[in-house]
Amino acid sequence: MNAFQFNTTGSIVFGEGAASRLGELVHPRGRRVLLVTDPGVMRAGLVTPIRDALDQQGLTHHLFDEVEADPPEALVLRAAQAARQAQVDVVLGIGGGSSLDVAKLVALLLGSEQSLTDMYGVNQARGQRLPLILVPTTAGTGSEVTPISIVTTGAHEKKGVVSPLLLPDVALLDPRLTAGLPAPVTAATGIDAMVHAIEAFTSANANNNPISRGLALQALQLLGANIKQAVNAGHDMAARSGMLLGSLLAGQAFANAPVAAVHALAYPLGGHYGIPHGLSNALMLPHVLRFNAPVSAQAYAEIAPYVFPALRGDEGQAACSRFIEAMAALCADIGLPTRLRDLNIAQADCNVLAEDAMKQTRLLVNNPRPVRYEDALAIYQAAW
């Protein structure tokens, strides 16, 4: 067995109503809190009970609610400046992956003497960070248990900060906070979580390990069993709990066995067109699976019955093919667009998308089958 290292968040608190405990979780770590979130979470009223919980512990809190999808560098730096001005000693991120990613970087920027640009890459971050607690309000990114933050740099490109320093002290998961998610967001973030698990299971990274693979299979079992119900009956707490736990497990898996070509080809869609990350992954997933099938048929066959119990008993290439088609059908069944043209992307843009995808070397190196520019272009054209 190959040597490996597995890291995850130090403390995980999970359960309906768990958000009411935030005050007692923050209290030992500091007295002045920066709440990092986005306007949608604010409109949904999810921050109010959290602020109440902090008030009950006599904690001072300051709000930064300007996070946007695919956060640009300037926004991260603006949030860090707000934290410095408020002299906070704890950072609390509440929301989807973008809010949690910004919160991670703010905590790190305030505890380290590095600039943000010096942190980009794998294990480039130095120093310490402020105490950090993350509260996801979507079941998809798994950001609460990953050492990764993604930032939009320049006009379209994305870069990542990857460091164990970004793992929070506490991840708090309350399924009630996800109950109001619209069906399209539930669908897209759910597929995002499934992509995390699939790519972690098949990652070519040297740190692909039995813990990640086991977590990935358990995540896929939970996500496959609950995604349709969560999309169609959003206030079903059993379904919401299954999705949130599945997302967490998938996050733990890919935090240690990193994702690959689905993500690499999804990022340019977000950078150029502002397509949400989960939907970008859903658009690319079937086509990357088909590209990988010649080298990953056995792995996909092993995954298949965890997601789709009806595929139990199938083997080899037949199971692989049925799994890929079932994943494509699932994306359509839960109401997601399935073609790039559905989102007004011109076929001529496939060339630029492929060029940008090839810059995602951090991710492409993990793909089980090498991806050349010509391959990326063919995948985009198949998705068009």
Image (cartoon, helix red, strand yellow):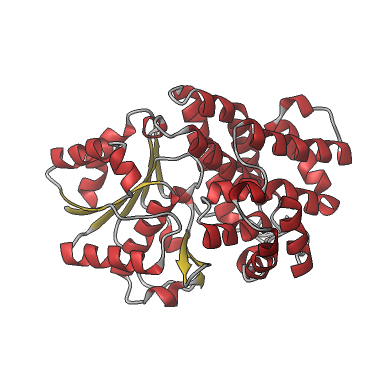
Q: Which of the 4 quarters of the picture holds residue 137?
A: top left
Instruction: In the rendered view, tell whether residue 15 sits above or below residue 67.
Output: above
Picture residue at 79% right of the left edge, 49% below the top:
290
Q: Position of residue 348 (x, y in %)?
A: 69, 63
Taking depth in this image into account, of 3 and 25 the one nearest to the observer is 25
Instruction: In the rendered view, tell whether residue 285 sits above or below residue 45.
Output: below
Picture residue at 16% right of the left edge, 53% below the top:
31
Picture residue at 51% right of the left edge, 43% below the top:
140
Instruction: In the rendered view, tell whether residue 162 sits above or below residue 331.
Output: below
Can see residue 210?
A: no
Q: Position of residue 332 (x, y in %)?
A: 66, 35
Can see residue 222?
A: yes
Q: Is 73 positioned to the left or the right of 238 in the image?
A: left
Q: Is 218 positioned to the left or the right of 311 in the image?
A: left
Taking depth in this image into account, of 304 and 151 the one nearest to the observer is 151
Q: Position of residue 253 (x, y in %)?
A: 58, 48
Q: Is 67 positioned to the left or the right of 122 in the image?
A: left
Q: Position of residue 248 (x, y in %)?
A: 50, 42
